[in-house]
Image (cartoon, grey):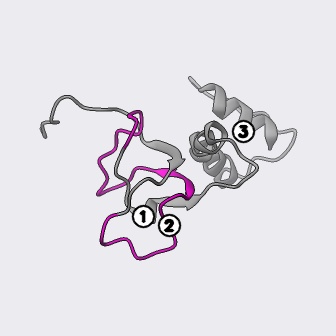
Amino acid sequence: SKSVPLPRIIGQDVSGLVVAKGGRCVGNVNVGDHVFGVAGPGSSGGSAAQYCSIPERCLARKPPACLHSESAALLAGLPAFQTLKLAKVNPGDNVLMLGPMDMDVRVAKAL
């Protein structure tokens, strides 16, 4: 098994302000931009920390009308949304959800 260096800071969903940019960042994300995303491969993870390092490809600009807490929460519902769409769930269909999180139920009701 692979060991995890300690202390390990948890968290994958991120939303915040870009305060620094590495030399390999050549895309559209700049210092001062409000962004959200998921800490993917090549990241330090740890989005529960005050600062974290996230690859630029894992970020998108936060919509101005969304709060940071809302934009980070959007990503939490993505797996449920994708699964329900793949299953071709339609309005009025009954759905059995075993051990759902609150976000899963909200996504199902919104469909």
CB contact under 8 Å: marks 1 and 3: no
CB contact under 8 Å: marks 1 and 2: yes
State the residue position of label 2.
29
Where disc 2 sits, the SS reads: loop
Q: Position of residue 72 (x, y in %)?
A: 58, 42
- In this picture, residue 27 sits left or right of residue 41: right
Label 2 crowd (10 A; few <14 / some 14-19 / many >=20)? some
State the residue position of label 1.
56
Please give the name of the residue rendered at 25% of the width and 32% of the height, measured from the top-left corner.
8
Which one is earlier in the sequence, the residue at label 1 or at label 3? 1
Where disc 1 sits, the SS reads: helix
Q: Position of residue 51 (x, y in %)?
A: 38, 42
Looking at the rendered structure, which numbered label has been put on residue 46?
none
Residue found at the far bottom of this picture? 26
State the residue position of label 3.
107
User: Is residue 34 magenta-colored?
Assistant: yes
3D distance between C-alphas at marks 1 and 2: 7 Å
Q: Tell me where the magenta segment starts and ends, as one range.
A: 22-51
